[in-house]
Image (spheres, rainbow, N blue to C red):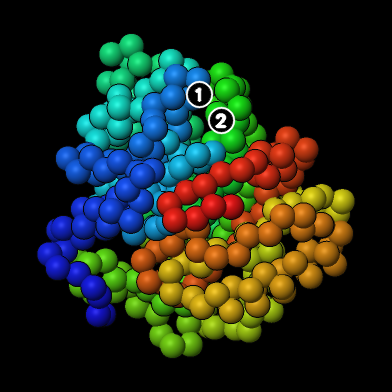
Amino acid sequence: MKKFVNDPKQFVPEMLKGIALANPDTITYVPEYNLIMRSDAPNNDKVSIVQGSGSGHEPAHVMAVGPGMLDAACPGDVFAAPPADYVFETAKRVASDKGVLLLVNNYTGDRMAFEMAQELAEAEDIKVATLFIDDDVAVQDSTWTVGRRGVAGNFFVIKAVGAKAEQGAELDEVIAVGEKVNSVTRTMGIALTACTPPAKGAPLFELADDEMEVGVGIHGEPGRRRAKLVSADEIVDELLGAVVPDLPYASGDRVALMINGLGGTPISELYLLFGIAAQKLADQGITVAKSYVGEYCTSLEMAGASLTLVRLDDEIEALLDAPASIVNRIF
């Protein structure tokens, strides 16, 4: 696999430096902690929102820093949790009078790092809480998790808690919104190829040209099964067949529908999948009220996609509609 890379050990720092140089007026980079933060943070009138995980999932999470979204992100190496001291230093630097909320995708290494960081922060009288995201319906327990994995649905939690924090809400109110969104968000993905971490130099797994991994994790963890590649219609049936009954979503629901690219899928194919999914949901009486198509949480250059549904109510929809801007993008 050909990649633009110098020293694989410097892949993440060089990427973070590039983000900072491309956004000099809005982003501050602290190299010793892999820390990307808003240049105007902390703001004592709002809760600070932090997320971090392994790198390789960009734009999650280092490119989701900005008004109405994250105040800071502290990634680890590719597909590796950040060290606890990185998370602790991040929490310290963005701590506000209203507190800090740490968002964590449910992976064992991330949980350990963030829980330890919370303990360290509390020992210094920093007001801090942790919220775990576990939207993946594919498997209950996986290679790196106990319980469900946190995947692309984390975007909706970030957006909702970021908007609530911008309104000046208290920490417990922001947590409640995050828990609410997480509780009505479900995701499952399918991979058509593996990906190659820069330091490894070889694919994480092998898929034949006529195979797909159903329910793949964003680090290449096995899903529900390996199967023969089928048509786009059948792939969407597989994804909806897993996601819709899980909550369950039902006729009369208004939902946000996301088709998320895993890094190596053309946008044309993502829109093709979205169109199929939106029609199939309409056939079930489920209204797609908000649409998201693109790359939100990737797995390096993996070809594949995930489908996320969020059941909307007036509060969640208003928070998703609130203004926000992130690295090199306003939406």
Q: Which residue is mark 1?
A: 46
User: What is the crowding at mark 1: few (fewer than 14 residues within 10 Å), some, or many (at least 20)?
Assistant: many
The image quarter in which residue 99 lies: top left
Residue drawn at the location 33% of the way across and 11% of the way down: 125
Q: How many marks on residues?
A: 2
Relative image position of residue 278 (x, y in whole percent): 75, 67
The image quarter in which residue 115 lies: top left
The residue at the far front in this view is 25
Query: Tag 1, which secondary structure?
Result: loop
Relative image position of residue 12 (x, y in whole percent): 24, 55
Q: Nearer the viewer, residue 141 or 26?
A: 26
Q: Nearer the viewer, residue 66 or 286?
A: 66
Q: Amino acid at mark 2?
A: Glu
Q: Which residue is mark 2?
A: 166
Q: Amino acid at mark 1?
A: Lys
Query: Tag 2, which secondary structure?
Result: helix
- N-terminal of the pair, mark 2 or mark 1, is 1
Q: Are marks 2 and 1 in contact (CB under 8 Å)?
A: yes
Relative image position of residue 44 (x, y in whole percent): 45, 19
Residue drawn at the location 67% of the way across and 70% of the way down: 274
The image quarter in which residue 199 lies: bottom left
